[in-house]
């Protein structure tokens, strides 16, 4: 089967949708299918087509931390898709590149599968800045219902997402299919004990230190401020324990979170390590003892699965999506 995957974010970007799409592509190919990935070009304004990847240029929307909005009508991209002759189109995101996918499905008269990865109601403030929030939420719900009804098949990655869809009036059949993860990447053998020791030495972490780690996009909806404040409380209650909090990733909330750590007097113990390459994330997980997250905006919690595959304790803020992840 020839499958065309459409996504607004793809590797080397680090986020759940990019990781899910790459995992899906790899699994399809291991099972003998051909896959074309249509995604955004985050580096320049050129249309790039190589290695069965079509990277489409778009306008950067800085209010949504680097998101690129591409035109739904792109004759060059459509020509590539048409010549590829896909049997099915699978849309992983909701705007931008997704429009190209829906346009192609309609013009080529082929089925379209839609996976809902992102709880957009948790992100409206990036655009509304708190104004007309209710109208924005109602608009998103109307749009979701419309797009889902248009799709041949609809996939939710968790029961939490399925339940949300029912509450906003979606009546279509919902397939609950969690994103798979290649856990072998996170084994101690794959990472290497020597690599772990060298990275700890580079960061000034002693083997006896208790290491908390937060990994992912650093943005308001991830509630990392709660993690930092909770770590501060831990330091107050347990001054006898040498510890640190590693925050791995990039995002718009970095400056205010650094200021928060400074104001609490724990800026020496809270280390902001910045963005790391996808192939390095297993190493960074292995630096920690406890994975911490206060986010309740996840649809399935991939980082929790990765952390547990890395043999970390997962310390989570309760969210329904974790009922199928953490026992």
Image: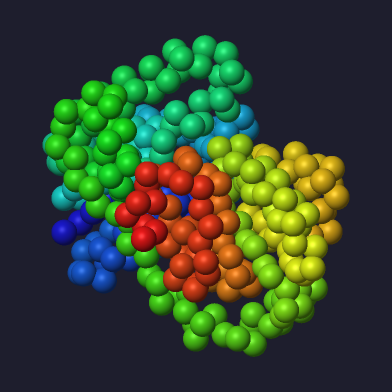
For residue 17, side relative to residue 147 (left or right): right
Residue lying farthest to the front in this orientation = 237
279 relative to 196, above or below? above
Q: Is residue 112 visible?
A: no
128 relative to 60, above or below? above
Q: Residue at x 47, y 40 (%)?
A: 297
| Residue 276 % position (x, y) | 62, 62
Q: Residue at x 20, y 35 (%)?
A: 151
Q: Residue at x 62, y 32 (%)?
A: 62
Screen quadrant of the C terminus: bottom left
Total of numbered circles in the picture?
0
Residue 220 or residue 14, whichever sits in front: 220
Screen quadrant of the N terminus: bottom left
Looking at the image, what colour scheme do you see? Answer: rainbow
Q: Is residue 133 visible?
A: yes
For residue 211, side relative to residue 124 (left or right): right
Residue 169 or residue 83, whichever sits in front: 169
| Residue 279 % position (x, y) | 53, 69
Q: Residue at x 42, y 20 (%)?
A: 137
| Residue 111 % position (x, y) | 15, 41
């Amino acid at each position: 089967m020839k499958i065309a995957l459409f996504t607004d974010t793809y590797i080397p970007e680090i986020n759940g949708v990019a990781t899910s799409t790459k995992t899906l592509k790899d699994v399809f190919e291991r099972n003998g299918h051909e896959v074309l990935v249509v995604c955004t070009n985050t580096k320049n304004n050129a249309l790039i087509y190589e290695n069965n990847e079509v990277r489409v240029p778009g306008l950067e929307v800085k209010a949504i931390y680097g998101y690129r909005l591409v035109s739904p009508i792109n004759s060059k991209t459509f020509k590539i898709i048409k010549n590829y002759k896909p049997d099915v189109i699978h849309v992983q995101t909701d705007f931008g590149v997704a429009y190209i996918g829906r346009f192609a499905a309609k013009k080529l008269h082929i089925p379209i599968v839609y996976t809902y990865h992102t709880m957009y109601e948790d992100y409206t403030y990036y655009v509304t800045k708190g104004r007309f929030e209710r109208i924005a939420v109602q608009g998103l719900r109307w749009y979701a219902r419309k797009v889902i009804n248009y799709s041949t098949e609809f996939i939710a990655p968790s029961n939490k997402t399925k339940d949300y869809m029912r509450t906003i009036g979606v009546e279509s059949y919902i397939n609950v299919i969690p994103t798979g993860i290649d856990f072998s990447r996170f084994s101690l053998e794959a990472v290497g004990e020597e690599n772990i020791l060298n990275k700890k030495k580079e960061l000034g972490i002693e083997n006896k230190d208790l290491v908390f780690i937060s990994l992912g996009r650093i943005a308001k909806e991830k509630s990392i401020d709660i993690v930092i404040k909770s770590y501060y409380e831990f330091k107050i209650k347990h001054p006898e324990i040498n510890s640190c909090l590693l925050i791995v990733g990039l995002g718009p909330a970095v400056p205010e979170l650094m200021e928060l750590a400074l104001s609490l007097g724990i800026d020496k113990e809270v280390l902001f390590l910045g963005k790391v390459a996808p192939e390095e994330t297993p190493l960074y997980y292995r630096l920690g003892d406890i994975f911490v997250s206060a986010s309740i905006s996840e649809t399935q919690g991939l980082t929790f699965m990765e952390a547990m595959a890395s043999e970390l304790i997962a310390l989570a803020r309760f969210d329904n999506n974790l009922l199928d992840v953490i026992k």
